[in-house]
Image: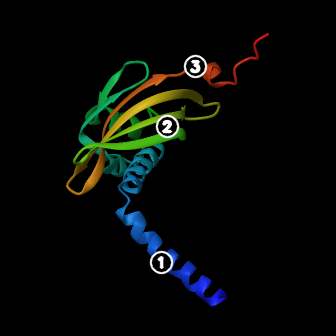
Amino acid sequence: MKSHLFALAVFALALSPLRAATDPAAAWRAADDARVAAMISADPAKLAAAFSDDLIYVHSNGKVDTKATFAPAIASGKSAYHSVTYEQRDFREVAAGLVLMTARCRVQLGKTAPFNELYLSVLAAYRLEKGAWRFLAWQSCKLDTAATAAPAAKK
């Protein structure tokens, strides 16, 4: 009986990469993870690979950037991303080759500690371009961190 269980476990582990390869959400998460890593590393080649040429990035303060303005700002250190921590992140394919991501995250910005921390609600888009998911759009708004704390008990 134990040998059958072991064989079943080995078979299940062997299928795991196959499932991941056929799970579109895994590819979308990987694209977003690569975009975050590129922004934190500030590596121009990684930014160029992650960002669509048609990128529209609307910051939480309303400032609008394109790939032509945003990637150089990150690469030069003018916009320095230290970390992005997701509280929630969901993906939905809305049309063939177009995925929307909704998320709540904490973003730490700045070159040195103490970092400026933003708590954001986000709508982002990824588009399949020449076989790769590329970061197409971002719109975020600041959330009140006090609103996320446990509500006070009513008396």
Q: Which mark is residue 14?
A: 1
Front position among marks 1 and 2 = 1
Q: How is the image coloured?
A: rainbow
Q: Position of residue 57 (x, y in %)?
A: 33, 30
Quadrant assignment for the N terminus: bottom right
Q: Disc 3 to disc 2, how far (Cα)?
A: 20 Å
Pick out the residue farthest to the right.
155
Question: Is residue 21 shown above or below 81?
Answer: below
Q: Position of residue 148 (x, y in %)?
A: 62, 25
- Of labels 1 and 2, earlier in sequence is 1
- Give the residue drawn at x 66%, y 87%: 2
- Give the residue drawn at x 60%, y 31%: 115
Q: Position of residue 154 (x, y in %)?
A: 75, 12
Left of 70 or right of it: where is 42?
right
Front position among marks 1 and 3 = 1
Q: Position of residue 55 (x, y in %)?
A: 27, 36
Q: Disc 1 to disc 3, how far (Cα)?
A: 45 Å
Residue that mark 2 sits on? 81
Question: Is residue 127 shown above or below 66?
Answer: below
Q: Quadrant of residue 125?
A: top left
The three-letter amino acid code for the residue at tag 1 is Ala
Pick out the residue farthest to the front.
1
Residue that mark 3 sits on? 144
